[in-house]
Amino acid sequence: MTADDRRDAPLRRLCRATPAATGAPSSGRRSSRCSTQSRIAPRYALVREQVGLLNRQLANNLGAIVTIKSFTAEPREVDRIAAESGEYR
């Protein structure tokens, strides 16, 4: 399973029980769950991307904490993380 597969798993669960998958007769219409998935997918992708950016910044700051402290840059880094966090909200 790739990272994309893991990321998209919650969306695929929304569309799992379609008539074709269950063997039930199809009315020719798309499942409302699939419709929901297509509406949610773009927003979900944006949220996941923002979480990735926030996690990257946090990991970078934790790895460089000695450098940040040596240059007394804590307030600057707090502001950067606050801005990234605000974007995620």
Image (cartoon, rainbow, N blue to C red):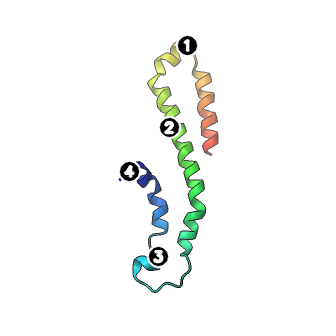
Q: Position of residue 14 (x, y in %)?
A: 49, 67
Which residue is pictured at 63% across the width and 41% down the height? 87
Q: Which amino acid is tagged 2?
A: Asn
Q: Is residue 29 left or right of residue 21?
A: right
Picture layout, residue 3 above or below residue 25: above
Q: Which amino acid is tagged 1?
A: Phe
Q: Which mark is residue 8?
A: none
Q: Which residue is mark 4?
A: 2
Q: Position of residue 51 (x, y in %)?
A: 53, 43
Q: Residue furthest top?
A: 70
* Nearer-N-terminus badge (3/4): 4
Q: Position of residue 75 (x, y in %)?
A: 61, 22
Cα–Cα span, label 2 and label 4: 19 Å
Picture layout, residue 35 above or below residue 68: below
Q: Which amino acid is tagged 3?
A: Thr
Q: Which residue is mark 3?
A: 18
SS of the residue under disc 4: loop
Cα–Cα span, label 3 and label 1: 58 Å
Q: Residue furthest left?
A: 1
- Considering depth in this image, is 77 or 48 the residue closer to the camera? 48
SS of the residue under disc 1: loop
Q: Position of residue 1 (x, y in %)?
A: 35, 53
SS of the residue under disc 3: loop
- Considering depth in this image, is 85 or 14 the residue closer to the camera? 14
For discs 2 and 1, the disc positioned in front in the rendered view: 2
Q: Which residue is mark 2?
A: 55
* Nearer-N-terminus badge (2/4): 4
For discs 3 and 1, the disc positioned in front in the rendered view: 3
For discs 3 and 2, the disc positioned in front in the rendered view: 3
